[in-house]
Amino acid sequence: MTLSLMVAFVGLIFWAYSSRRKKDFEEAANLPFADEESDKRTLKSGD
C-alpha cells in the first residue's frame, strides 16, 4: 500500500510540473484578475 501511494505521489508531482500543463496552470492562476479587466472597462464606459 505504501509503495502504491508513493508511486501515485511521484506521478502527481511529475504531472503538476510537466511543461505541457504550464499554460493551463498559468491561465488558472490569472482567473481572479479577469474580473478586474471587465470591471475597468465597465467603469470607463459608465463615465
Image (spheres, rainbow, N blue to C red):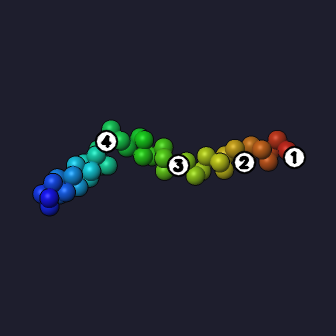
Q: CA distance from mark 2 to mark 4?
A: 32 Å
Q: In the picture provided, is 37 more to the left or to the right than 7?
A: right
In three-dimensional space, the C-alpha distance between marks 1 and 4, rounded to whole angstroms, equals 43 Å
Residue found farthest to the right: 47
> Observer-nearest residue: 25 or 11?
11
Q: Secondary structure at mark 3?
A: loop
- Does residue 1 appear left or right of residue 38 in this picture? left
The residue pinned by badge 4 equals 19
Which residue is under mark 3?
30
Mark sitting earlier along the chain (3/2): 3
Q: Residues within 10 Å of mark 1 (few under 14, many from 20)?
A: few
- Identify the amino acid type marked 1: Asp
**Mark closer to the chain start, 2 or 1:** 2
For the residues marked 2 and 1, what is the alpha-carbon distance in whole angstroms?
13 Å
Residue bearing mark 1: 47
Give how far apart the Cα atoms at labels 3 and 1 are: 27 Å
Disc 2 crowd rating (10 Å Cα; few below 14, some 14-19, many 20+) is few
- Position in image of residue 10 (x %, y %): 20, 53
Query: Horizontal and vertical percent for residue 47?
Result: 87, 46
From the image, tell me which residue sits under label 2. 39
Q: Secondary structure at mark 2?
A: helix
Q: Residue at x 55, y 48 (%)?
A: 31
Can residue 38 be seen here? The reply is yes
Q: Earlier in the sequence, mark 3 or mark 1?
A: 3
